[in-house]
Image: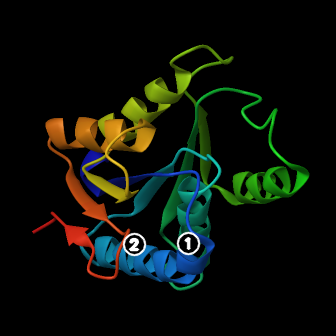
Amino acid sequence: MREKTACFTGHREMPKKDMRKIRRNTLNVIIKAYEKGYRYFGSGGAIGFDLLAADCVLHLKKKYPDIRLILVLPCHGQTKYWSDKEIRKYNKIKKKADEVVFTSEQYFNGCMQKRNRHLADNSSLCICYLTKNAGGTAYTVNYADRHGLKTVNVSSASFIDKTD
Protein backbone atom coordinates (compact mmCIF):
# COMPACT_ATOMS: atom_id res chain seq x y z
CA MET A 1 0.00 0.00 0.00
CA ARG A 2 2.97 2.35 0.67
CA GLU A 3 3.72 2.60 -3.06
CA LYS A 4 0.16 3.86 -3.66
CA THR A 5 0.17 6.32 -0.74
CA ALA A 6 1.06 10.02 -0.68
CA CYS A 7 1.26 12.21 2.40
CA PHE A 8 0.80 15.94 2.86
CA THR A 9 2.80 18.33 4.99
CA GLY A 10 2.73 22.10 5.00
CA HIS A 11 2.70 25.30 6.95
CA ARG A 12 -0.25 26.24 9.13
CA GLU A 13 -0.18 29.79 7.80
CA MET A 14 -0.43 30.53 4.09
CA PRO A 15 -0.77 33.95 2.44
CA LYS A 16 -4.45 34.66 1.76
CA LYS A 17 -3.54 36.18 -1.62
CA ASP A 18 -2.00 32.84 -2.69
CA MET A 19 -4.77 30.49 -1.50
CA ARG A 20 -6.34 29.95 -4.93
CA LYS A 21 -2.96 29.19 -6.50
CA ILE A 22 -1.99 26.83 -3.67
CA ARG A 23 -5.33 25.00 -3.93
CA ARG A 24 -5.08 24.77 -7.74
CA ASN A 25 -1.49 23.47 -7.56
CA THR A 26 -2.48 20.96 -4.88
CA LEU A 27 -5.44 19.68 -6.92
CA ASN A 28 -3.20 19.34 -9.99
CA VAL A 29 -0.53 17.42 -8.07
CA ILE A 30 -3.11 15.07 -6.52
CA ILE A 31 -4.56 14.39 -9.98
CA LYS A 32 -1.07 13.72 -11.38
CA ALA A 33 -0.35 11.37 -8.47
CA TYR A 34 -3.69 9.62 -9.02
CA GLU A 35 -2.82 9.14 -12.70
CA LYS A 36 0.47 7.54 -11.58
CA GLY A 37 -1.42 5.03 -9.42
CA TYR A 38 -1.67 6.74 -6.04
CA ARG A 39 -5.00 6.07 -4.34
CA TYR A 40 -4.36 6.81 -0.64
CA PHE A 41 -3.65 10.32 0.61
CA GLY A 42 -2.64 10.92 4.23
CA SER A 43 -3.19 14.25 5.95
CA GLY A 44 -2.14 15.23 9.46
CA GLY A 45 -5.36 17.21 9.96
CA ALA A 46 -3.63 20.39 11.14
CA ILE A 47 -4.82 23.92 10.42
CA GLY A 48 -3.52 25.29 7.13
CA PHE A 49 -2.14 23.14 4.34
CA ASP A 50 -3.11 19.80 5.92
CA LEU A 51 -6.80 20.69 5.92
CA LEU A 52 -6.61 22.38 2.51
CA ALA A 53 -5.04 19.25 1.00
CA ALA A 54 -7.57 16.97 2.74
CA ASP A 55 -10.38 19.10 1.37
CA CYS A 56 -8.87 18.79 -2.13
CA VAL A 57 -8.89 14.98 -1.86
CA LEU A 58 -12.54 15.03 -0.77
CA HIS A 59 -13.38 17.35 -3.68
CA LEU A 60 -11.75 14.91 -6.14
CA LYS A 61 -13.80 11.95 -4.82
CA LYS A 62 -16.61 13.07 -7.13
CA LYS A 63 -14.44 12.40 -10.18
CA TYR A 64 -12.27 9.63 -8.70
CA PRO A 65 -14.49 7.56 -6.36
CA ASP A 66 -11.66 5.18 -5.42
CA ILE A 67 -9.43 7.94 -4.03
CA ARG A 68 -9.05 7.65 -0.24
CA LEU A 69 -8.41 10.23 2.46
CA ILE A 70 -6.66 8.97 5.58
CA LEU A 71 -6.44 11.42 8.47
CA VAL A 72 -3.40 10.67 10.59
CA LEU A 73 -3.91 12.67 13.76
CA PRO A 74 -1.31 13.25 16.48
CA CYS A 75 -3.65 12.76 19.45
CA HIS A 76 -7.20 13.12 20.66
CA GLY A 77 -8.09 16.72 21.45
CA GLN A 78 -5.73 18.30 18.93
CA THR A 79 -8.34 21.04 18.36
CA LYS A 80 -8.34 22.17 22.00
CA TYR A 81 -7.08 25.70 21.28
CA TRP A 82 -8.57 26.14 17.81
CA SER A 83 -11.27 28.64 16.85
CA ASP A 84 -14.86 27.47 16.37
CA LYS A 85 -14.53 28.03 12.62
CA GLU A 86 -11.39 25.87 12.42
CA ILE A 87 -13.02 23.13 14.50
CA ARG A 88 -16.11 23.07 12.24
CA LYS A 89 -13.93 22.68 9.14
CA TYR A 90 -11.83 19.98 10.83
CA ASN A 91 -14.91 18.02 11.99
CA LYS A 92 -16.49 18.21 8.53
CA ILE A 93 -13.35 16.76 6.94
CA LYS A 94 -12.89 14.18 9.71
CA LYS A 95 -16.46 12.96 9.22
CA LYS A 96 -15.87 12.47 5.47
CA ALA A 97 -12.44 10.83 5.77
CA ASP A 98 -12.22 7.18 4.75
CA GLU A 99 -10.06 6.37 7.77
CA VAL A 100 -8.91 8.18 10.91
CA VAL A 101 -5.73 7.07 12.68
CA PHE A 102 -4.37 8.45 15.97
CA THR A 103 -0.61 8.03 16.43
CA SER A 104 -0.91 8.79 20.18
CA GLU A 105 -3.78 8.72 22.64
CA GLN A 106 -2.90 12.02 24.29
CA TYR A 107 -0.72 15.04 23.68
CA PHE A 108 2.96 14.90 24.60
CA ASN A 109 5.97 16.94 23.54
CA GLY A 110 6.89 15.32 20.23
CA CYS A 111 3.51 13.86 19.26
CA MET A 112 3.33 16.08 16.15
CA GLN A 113 6.72 14.80 14.97
CA LYS A 114 5.57 11.23 15.64
CA ARG A 115 2.52 11.87 13.45
CA ASN A 116 4.70 13.38 10.70
CA ARG A 117 7.10 10.43 10.72
CA HIS A 118 4.14 8.03 10.55
CA LEU A 119 2.82 9.85 7.48
CA ALA A 120 6.22 9.68 5.74
CA ASP A 121 6.97 6.10 6.83
CA ASN A 122 3.75 4.89 5.22
CA SER A 123 4.06 6.85 1.95
CA SER A 124 6.21 6.93 -1.16
CA LEU A 125 5.28 10.49 -2.17
CA CYS A 126 5.33 13.68 -0.08
CA ILE A 127 3.19 16.57 -1.33
CA CYS A 128 4.20 19.68 0.57
CA TYR A 129 3.69 23.39 0.89
CA LEU A 130 7.14 24.52 2.00
CA THR A 131 8.36 28.12 1.96
CA LYS A 132 10.63 28.15 5.05
CA ASN A 133 13.72 26.06 5.73
CA ALA A 134 12.98 25.69 9.45
CA GLY A 135 10.12 24.27 11.48
CA GLY A 136 7.95 21.17 11.41
CA THR A 137 7.25 21.18 7.68
CA ALA A 138 10.95 21.49 6.79
CA TYR A 139 11.75 18.70 9.27
CA THR A 140 9.12 16.44 7.69
CA VAL A 141 10.22 17.16 4.11
CA ASN A 142 13.87 16.49 5.07
CA TYR A 143 12.80 13.28 6.84
CA ALA A 144 10.86 12.22 3.74
CA ASP A 145 13.87 12.97 1.49
CA ARG A 146 16.21 10.97 3.74
CA HIS A 147 13.79 8.03 3.59
CA GLY A 148 13.55 8.01 -0.19
CA LEU A 149 10.16 9.62 -0.76
CA LYS A 150 9.52 11.53 -3.95
CA THR A 151 8.65 15.15 -3.13
CA VAL A 152 6.45 17.76 -4.79
CA ASN A 153 6.38 21.31 -3.41
CA VAL A 154 3.21 23.19 -4.43
CA SER A 155 4.36 26.55 -3.02
CA SER A 156 4.81 28.27 -6.37
CA ALA A 157 3.34 28.21 -9.86
CA SER A 158 6.51 26.51 -11.08
CA PHE A 159 6.52 24.01 -8.25
CA ILE A 160 9.39 21.63 -7.58
CA ASP A 161 8.54 18.12 -8.71
CA LYS A 162 11.03 15.40 -7.75
CA THR A 163 8.76 12.55 -8.89
CA ASP A 164 10.36 11.83 -12.28
The Cα atoms of the two marked residues, 2 and 1, are separated by: 8 Å
User: Does residue 122 appear in this view?
Assistant: no
The residue shown at (60%, 56%) is 48
Q: Is residue 115 above or below residue 152?
A: above
- Marker disc for residue 30: 2
Q: Residue 19: which quarter of the image?
A: bottom right
Residue 141 percent across, percent down from the top left: 30, 45
Residue 63 percent across, percent down from the top left: 52, 85
The quarter of the image holding the C terminus is bottom left
- Marker disc for residue 56: 1
User: Which residue is more in the foreground, 100 or 118?
Assistant: 118
Q: Residue 118: which quarter of the image?
A: top left
Q: In the displayed image of the protein, which residue is found farthest to the left? A: 164
The residue shown at (62%, 46%) is 46
Q: Are marks 2 and 1 in contact (CB under 8 Å)?
A: yes
Q: Secondary structure at mark 2?
A: helix
The residue shown at (53%, 29%) is 112
Q: Secondary structure at mark 1?
A: helix
Residue 73 percent across, percent down from the top left: 60, 36
Say whether disc 2 or disc 1 marks the residue closer to the N-terminus: 2
Q: Residues within 10 Å of mark 2 (few under 14, many from 20)?
A: many
Give the mark count.
2
Q: Amino acid at mark 1?
A: Cys
Report the side of 158 relative to 47 (left or right).
Answer: left
User: Does residue 139 appear in this view?
Assistant: yes
Q: Residue 75: which quarter of the image?
A: top right
Q: Residues within 10 Å of mark 1 (few under 14, many from 20)?
A: some
The residue shown at (48%, 68%) is 67
